[in-house]
């Protein structure tokens, strides 16, 4: 190798010296796996994973493009390679690919910048190894495209899609721009595109087919919302221009680092390269890529941030980039190629010194992820042994979040208290919106809910001196909360391992169990506060997912009327949700206002329940826990109008009544067709307690109860209806149109003598998508509960599940016998089909 190559290699090794030392390296996005977890990757692609969704399980069809990479870990484990070796091989592969690809596109100076900049360092430090592999693969793809080696380009594009399929979007952009700038032969472009598309689609058919059949190519709830861009637009234009990853160098999510002005060297060197090579079309190609990438990497921040939001909402596939920092892929590539055009050895020497200075936090061991040794490693390993030696299925809850040393597998899935706090049953028990895990101590039923989820162990991690703010008050709160957990009635024992604490619960349910009774609750989930034994009573909330009534359910009207009950049986296709037409803020600009449909109105969605509840508590002194049928809340503060299109029929409306509301009038063609009095003059009150800590005493808050209910309005014809509000706050959840005003006949609520159920469930796990069950001792038809996230594609002997407890799958069973539970998309996995034909 040349002296330039040796110099670059030396700098790279200096930056990556931590990876040369034995031992495991972990990060939030690359946690330590159990051996069972590694071995389970040696398997056919599975469309369901019991470990995602905070250990409650979920469909992974839309991310199965990474199965070959996971399979590689499984093969390595089968060969006896441990996690420490496997992760080093992956990082080495990422660096090797980047080295080879960039050495073909640019000089050693460009290669050095590409491999040691703040973006790739934080990708690896944060444990985003698959993205790091894609980062290394992208220049390889570009090289083969420019060399017009079609087959090699197609194979490299396939590898890129396996590492991270989103980065293929960048490849398509670069290739398209290349065609426009260099005017390559159209025949070559079409041939290359066709062969690559056939190869990618053919290879990925194993997950595309079940995804298309089951309509499973969707983003998680909320991910497609433009509010995600607001939340994740961390970089501003200075960060992007200076090529500084916004979290440099602490790499703590949401904690933006100070702008280091010395990073201005990147745009200065790039500008010099553009000037010196200004007659080259190649130079202007990369300059254009750089300009576009810098503009997009800042997300929706100033200037012209609305452009990113518009692209996110309207350009197909662009909503894959809710985190605009991904555009640093293109910034890194463009800066490296451009600066690489400065081929002087003196420039390389100076740049090498600069990169050493920039990476001093890495070299001096100040990083917090995979470039550092895990803190409290021995303590966590002791806890891991206790959990792994427990052969019975159970979940482990980490409070508030998992430390990367916490393993997870299908026998002991790992949950995080922060994530559970976003789920409705736990959100309803949270006081305020800032301390989102206080439901553990504030909700009287939290122990029961965790028992339903099979939580046997709770881990309370030590404060991390590299990632946590170690102020005295924070340490005091940490210790106080630990003591509060230990005093909860459903905690059985506490064991301290240095600064790390392991709690064990009094009892926890298995993965499958049978409830003695099934309750059909019309009303809110504040019924949990009544002391109901949740292990014996499967609860269906009628206003969460309507249309699930059955004669075998015991109906409970929780402060609701018979009209409310009847409306739960109406198909949701008859519903109109005004919130679907509104924006999140009550402004008069945008699509709605331009049509005069709803000036002054705004909305909150189902996922905003915690925010919405805190808002009406703090601003209006009201409290409400009602469900919204999945349609959100249309909110009017003061006197406002909202126009909606309806069909002919009898109109019903579900609205909120409270001590701060007033009146809702509904008009059609300037004629009033109905009035709803939404004012409650003597409302019931509710007291909510917030437990104090440090020297602060417990605090109590009194709120007036607000209630949602259905009202019959009157007949309407095809056309617009206008809703006019009076009062401080009025909320419309839903309208419903019954074409013939025919209410369905209510199921008969038969009262029978309770039968004590003592049925047993035995089960064997065939795979994460297939279970065999045997039920015995069943004395009456009952609800079988499957303790994983509700998904209608689970089938028990072809029976679809019912949502129980607002979380889990319930199946109505009538008899003893053997049952099979399958996740429907798996049968469309062609590899699984062949396997079944061979061995069944």
Image (cartoon, rainbow, N blue to C red):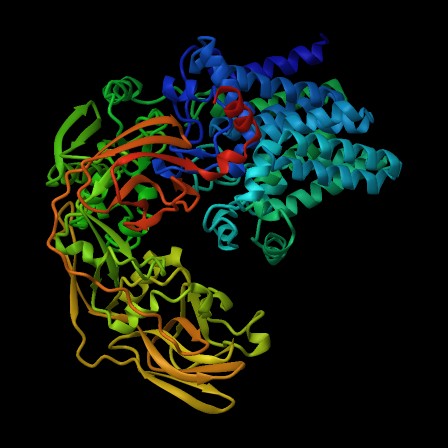
> Horizontally, is 396 left or right of 307 in the view?
left
Q: Quadrant of the N terminus?
A: top right
In the rendered image, the vertical position of residue 235 relative to residue 603, given as above or below = above
**In the image shown, does 725 or 197 lie closer to the viewer?**
197
Q: How many marks?
A: 0
> Horizontally, is 314 left or right of 585 in the view?
right
At horizontal 20% and vertical 81% (from top left) the residue drawn is 681
Residue 722, given in percent of the width and then of the height, sits at 47, 82
Q: Is residue 165 visible?
A: yes
Q: Is residue 576 visible?
A: no
In the rendered image, the vertical position of residue 190 relative to residue 442, given as above or below = above
> Horizontally, is 781 left or right of 135 in the view?
left
At horizontal 26% and vertical 18% (from top left) the residue drawn is 385
**In the image shown, does 740 or 352 lie closer to the viewer?**
740
In the rendered image, the vertical position of residue 761 relative to residue 17, given as above or below = below
Residue 234, given in percent of the width and then of the height, sits at 51, 45
Residue 63, given in percent of the width and then of the height, sits at 53, 35
In the rendered image, the vertical position of residue 94 relative to residue 303, given as above or below = above
């Amino acid at each position: 190798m040349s002296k330039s190559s040796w110099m670059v290699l030396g700098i790279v090794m200096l930056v990556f010296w931590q990876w040369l030392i034995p031992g495991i390296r972990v990060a939030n996005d690359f946690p330590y796996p159990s051996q069972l977890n590694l071995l389970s990757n040696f398997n056919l692609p599975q469309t369901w994973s019991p470990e995602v969704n905070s250990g409650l399980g979920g469909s992974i069809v839309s991310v199965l493009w990474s199965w070959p990479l996971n399979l590689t870990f499984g093969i390595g484990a089968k060969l006896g390679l441990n996690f420490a070796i496997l992760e080093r091989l992956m990082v080495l592969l990422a660096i090797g690919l980047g080295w080879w690809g960039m050495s073909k596109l640019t000089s050693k100076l460009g290669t050095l910048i590409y491999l040691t900049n703040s973006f790739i360092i934080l990708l690896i430090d944060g444990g985003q190894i698959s993205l790091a592999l894609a980062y290394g693969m992208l220049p390889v793809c570009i090289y083969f495209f420019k060399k017009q080696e079609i087959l090699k380009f197609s194979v490299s594009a396939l590898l890129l899609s396996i590492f991270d399929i989103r980065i293929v979007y960048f490849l398509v952009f670069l290739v398209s721009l290349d065609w426009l700038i260099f005017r390559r032969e159209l025949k070559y472009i079409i041939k290359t595109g066709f062969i690559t598309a056939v190869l990618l689609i053919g290879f990925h058919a194993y997950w595309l087919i079940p995804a298309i059949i089951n309509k499973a190519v969707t983003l998680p709830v909320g991910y497609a919302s433009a509010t995600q861009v607001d939340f994740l637009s961390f970089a501003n234009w200075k960060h992007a221009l200076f090529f500084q990853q916004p979290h440099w160098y602490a790499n703590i999510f949401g904690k933006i680092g100070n702008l280091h002005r010395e990073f201005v060297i990147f745009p200065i060197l790039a500008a010099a390269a553009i000037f010196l090579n200004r007659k080259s079309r190649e130079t202007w190609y990369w300059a254009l890529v750089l300009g576009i990438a810098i503009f997009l990497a800042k997300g929706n921040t100033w200037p012209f941030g609305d452009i990113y939001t518009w692209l996110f909402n309207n350009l197909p596939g662009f909503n894959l980039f809710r985190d605009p920092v991904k555009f640093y892929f293109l910034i890194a590539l463009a800066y490296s190629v451009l600066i690489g055009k400065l081929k002087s050895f003196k420039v390389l020497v100076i740049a090498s010194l600069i990169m050493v200075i920039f990476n001093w936090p890495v070299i001096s061991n100040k990083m917090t992820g995979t470039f550092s040794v895990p803190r409290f490693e021995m303590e966590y390993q002791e806890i891991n042994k206790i959990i792994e030696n427990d052969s019975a299925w159970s979940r482990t809850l980490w409070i508030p979040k998992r430390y990367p040393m916490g393993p997870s597998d299908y026998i002991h899935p790992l949950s995080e208290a922060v994530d559970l706090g976003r789920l409705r049953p736990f959100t309803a028990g949270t006081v305020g919106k800032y301390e989102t895990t206080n439901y553990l101590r504030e909700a009287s039923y939290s122990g029961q809910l965790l028992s339903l989820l099979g939580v046997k162990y709770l881990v309370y991690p030590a404060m991390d001196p590299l990632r946590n703010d170690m102020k005295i008050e924070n340490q005091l709160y940490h210790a106080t909360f630990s003591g509060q957990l230990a005093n909860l009635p459903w905690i059985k024992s506490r064991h301290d391992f240095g600064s790390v604490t392991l709690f064990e619960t009094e009892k926890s349910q298995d993965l499958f169990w049978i409830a003695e009774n099934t309750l059909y609750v019309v009303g809110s989930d504040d019924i949990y506060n009544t002391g109901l034994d949740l292990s014996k009573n499967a609860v269906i909330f009628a206003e969460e997912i309507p249309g699930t009534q059955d004669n075998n359910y015991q109906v409970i009207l929780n402060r609701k009327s018979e009209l409310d009950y009847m409306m739960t049986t109406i198909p949701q296709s008859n519903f109109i949700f005004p919130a679907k037409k509104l924006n999140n803020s009550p402004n008069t600009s945008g699509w709605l206002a331009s049509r005069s449909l709803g000036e002054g109105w705004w909305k909150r969605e189902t996922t905003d329940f915690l925010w919405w509840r805190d808002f009406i508590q703090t601003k209006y002194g009201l409290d409400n826990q009602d469900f919204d049928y999945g349609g959100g809340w249309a909110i009017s503060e003061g006197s406002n109008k909202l126009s909606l299109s309806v069909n002919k029929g009898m109109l019903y409306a579900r609205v909120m009544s409270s001590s701060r509301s007033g009146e809702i009038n509904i008009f059609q063609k300037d004629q009033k067709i109905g009035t709803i009095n939404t004012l409650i003059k003597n409302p019931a009150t509710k007291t909510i307690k917030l437990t104090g800590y440090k020297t602060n005493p417990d605090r109590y808050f009194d709120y007036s109860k607000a209630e949602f209910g259905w009202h019959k309005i009157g007949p309407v014809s095809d056309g617009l209806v206008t809703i006019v509000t009076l009062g401080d706050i009025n909320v419309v959840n839903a309208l419903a149109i019954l074409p013939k005003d025919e209410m369905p006949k209510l199921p008969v609520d038969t009262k029978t003598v309770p039968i004590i159920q003592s049925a047993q469930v035995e089960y064997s796990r065939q795979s994460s998508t297939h279970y065999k069950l045997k039920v015995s001792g069943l004395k009456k038809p009952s609800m079988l509960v499957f303790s994983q996230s509700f998904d209608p594609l689970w089938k028990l002997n072809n029976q679809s599940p019912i949502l129980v407890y607002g979380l889990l799958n319930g199946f109505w069973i009538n008899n003893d016998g053997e049952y099979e539970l399958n996740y429907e998309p798996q049968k469309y996995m062609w590899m699984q089909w062949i396997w079944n034909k061979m061995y069944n």
